[in-house]
Amino acid sequence: MRTLFLLLIRLYQLAVSPLLPACCRFTPTCSAYAAEAITRFGALRGGLLTLWRILRCHPFAAGGFDPVPETFAGCRPCSGPREHTTDP
């Protein structure tokens, strides 16, 4: 899955992106961000990070430098069962 997504991103970068005007608000570009996120975190988590990035890209966004995070801070599983305590 990861390889397929990376291939599609690369095809976009080579075939579609040169035809469009340069108007990305963020650095790195969304396609470069997507490729790095998917490479680092896999198709599902990298795809979620990419989707979140694209949702933040709108005319009212300030833009700027927005690298892929070092760790995936999405929904984390609990560390284990919690002890149930009752107050007397």
Image (tube, grey):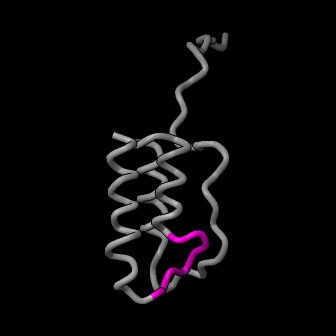
In-front residue for pair 55/66: 66
Is 3 situated left or right of 87 in this image? left
- Residue 30 in the image: state x and y as whole percent: 48, 68
- Residue 51 in the image: state x and y as whole percent: 41, 59
Tell me if residue 35 is in the magenta stretch: no
Q: Which residues are magenta?
A: 22-29
The residue shown at (59%, 43%) is: 73
Is 18 situated left or right of 80 in this image? left
In-front residue for pair 31/26: 31
- Residue 9 in the image: state x and y as whole percent: 38, 60
In-front residue for pair 76/45: 45
Quadrant (top left/top right/bottom left/bottom right) for the C terminus: top right
- Residue 39 in the image: state x and y as whole percent: 51, 45
Tell me if residue 28 is in the magenta stretch: yes
The residue shown at (47%, 75%) is: 57
**View extreme (bottom): residue:** 21
The quarter of the displayed image where residue 61 is located: bottom right
Is 70 situated left or right of 44 in this image? right
The residue shown at (32%, 46%) is: 4
Question: Compared to 59, does 71 lie above or below?
Answer: above
Magenta segment's dominant SS is loop
In-front residue for pair 15/80: 15
The residue shown at (46%, 60%) is: 52
Quadrant (top left/top right/bottom left/bottom right) for the N terminus: top left
